[in-house]
Image (cartoon, rainbow, N blue to C red):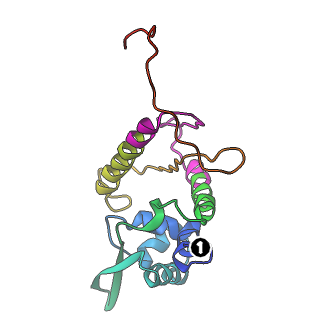
Amino acid sequence: MTATDPLLRALAHPVRLRIVSLVWNVPLSAAELSRELGISHALASQHLRRLDAVGLVELAEVRANRGGRERRYRAVHGSPLSDQRHEGVRLIAEAMAHNLRERAGRRAPGAEGVTSDAELWVAPEVWTDFRHRLAALFGELHDAARAPHAPGTVGIGATVMVFPLAEPDGTEPADPAPYTREPNDPQE
């Protein structure tokens, strides 16, 4: 995937990234998205068409609405958003940073949350285990998602991007030597 890939370019737009998030579990129409995002119906429709064209959303249902037909879309699960092995990851990071700034501005006063920033060096197996557990937690959160403003729900903002760092010279991190206990090391 390159930075000019249509799929990547669709994901790298902050509004389209929010749309994919909003329609993850609940199909929404362009009219519903325009109200939620504070944009025009025409612009919401345009973003949906772009996302549909690259396979990030799909038509979930068509229903009658005031004599017309309302097309509701949902996200196609398994999107490449979580795949960071392409050169366009920086574009997605920019879109995520934009959405994070916007969501932080809407944070409920005095609300509890979790904030963390880290640059850490850990054993490869710790990284692998953490990455899998974090993906599972976000999967649970996505699976529990309901329609925006549904009774009995609380809106939350969650933005996460974790990844291994390259060495200062830009090379891939080297695999550390396996740990071997020295004869005088205390037992764990």
Identify the residue position indicated by label 1 in the image: 2
Q: Is residue 89 visible?
A: yes
For residue 186, above or below residue 136: above
Q: Quadrant of residue 27?
A: bottom left
In the rendered structure, the answer to whether residue 78 lies left or right of residue 172 reads left
Task: Answer whether residue 46 is magenta in the image.
Answer: no
Residue drawn where x is 53% and y is 37% of the image:
115
Q: Which residues are magenta?
A: 101-129
SS for dot 1: loop
For residue 87, above or below residue 101: below
Q: Can you name the residue that lies furthest to the front here?
A: 183
Residue drawn where x is 48% and y is 83% of the image:
45
Instruction: Pick the quarter of the image with the C terminus.
Output: top left
For residue 141, above or below residue 113: below
Q: Quadrant of residue 14?
A: bottom right
Depth check: give the residue in front, 92 or 158.
Answer: 92
Image x and y of residue 171, in percent:
65, 50
In the rendered structure, the answer to whether residue 83 lies left or right of residue 118 reads left
For residue 88, above or below residue 119: below
Image x and y of residue 187, in percent:
37, 11
